[in-house]
Amino acid sequence: MMDVGRVCVKIAGRDAGKQCVIVDVVDERHVLIDGLTRRRKCNLMHLEPLAVVVDLKKGADHGAVVIALKSVGIEVPEVKKGTKERKKNPGRPVKQKVKHEKVAKVKKAPQVEKKEAPKKAAPVEKKVEEKKPEEAPVKKE
Amino acid sequence: MVAPRHRSRTKRRVFVRTPKGGSTLTFRIRKPSPARCPVTGEILKGVPREIPSILKNMPKSHKRPERPFGGVLSGRAMRRLFISEARAPQQQEEE
């Protein structure tokens, strides 16, 4: 009954309720499983066999297990290592905190009134008067 | 003589040692009863029995086991559920 290729349902542990395939028989009580569950050794007491058998080689890798389960109608989602798919609940809207930047108070230097330099008067244009010819002095007789 | 409003047994009485060396009487809320499975009736494991003010500050992983129906059904009830679900389509085919 519990041979390589038998599709089972895990009934204990964190993966309880998920479908898996027997990949290898370790000893009388333990088998190696893979599929929707983690690839690891499992006790036969924690498995419930189904009436489905899949063509699978002993010790097949995860890729072959995915293809074999797909032929039966069980899709194994791809999970990237290092990332957890977390359900995002809408929840309460988060208020955005407004950061008020602290402006350092700078003491202003006292304003010195600039004295304006006296304005220079515009140069007066010197008018060059035409010199009249000097009249000869009139001799008095 | 305890004041009339403190004679109720819903709160438990605790004698507390004061820094001066004396002791005073204080009243504290009682812990709730342990959680039980609705199917089998046995006490659920991994579920702490604490007052709400302490329970709400505990992380989620400390309040229930990490398995389907953890903190709701016992391990035995959960196994029976998954076994019956796995055998149900096979029984329908036989019929």
Image (cartoon, rainbow, N blue to C red):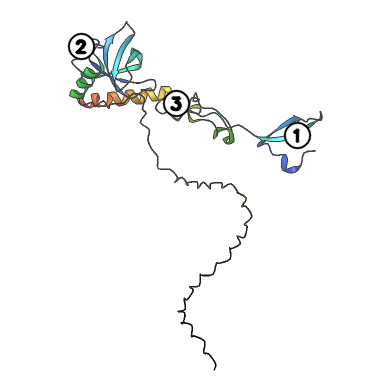
Q: Amino acid at mark 3?
A: Thr
What subunit carries mark 1? B
Question: Which residue occupies 44% across, 26% down?
Answer: B40
Query: Which numbered marker is on residue A57?
Result: 2
Q: Which residue is mark 3?
A: B40
Q: Amino acid at mark 1?
A: Leu
Are the numbered discs 1 and 2 placed on the same chain, yes or no? no
The reply to whether residue B95 is visible in this rendering is no
Mark positioned earlier in the residue sequence (3 or 1): 1
Q: Please, is residue A99 above or below residue A22 in the view? A: below
Per the image, the residue denoted by label 1 is: B25
Q: Position of residue A74 (x, y in %)?
A: 23, 26
* Quadrant, the N terminus of chain A: top left
**Which residue is pictured at 77% across the width and 33% down the height?**
B24
Per the model, the C-alpha gap separating discs 3 and 1 is 41 Å
Is residue A133 positioned above or below B12 on the image? below
User: Helix, strand, or loop for circle 2?
Assistant: loop
Q: Residue furthest top?
A: A27
- Residue A52 position by quadrant: top left
Q: Which one is nearer the viewer's eye here, A87 or B81?
A: A87
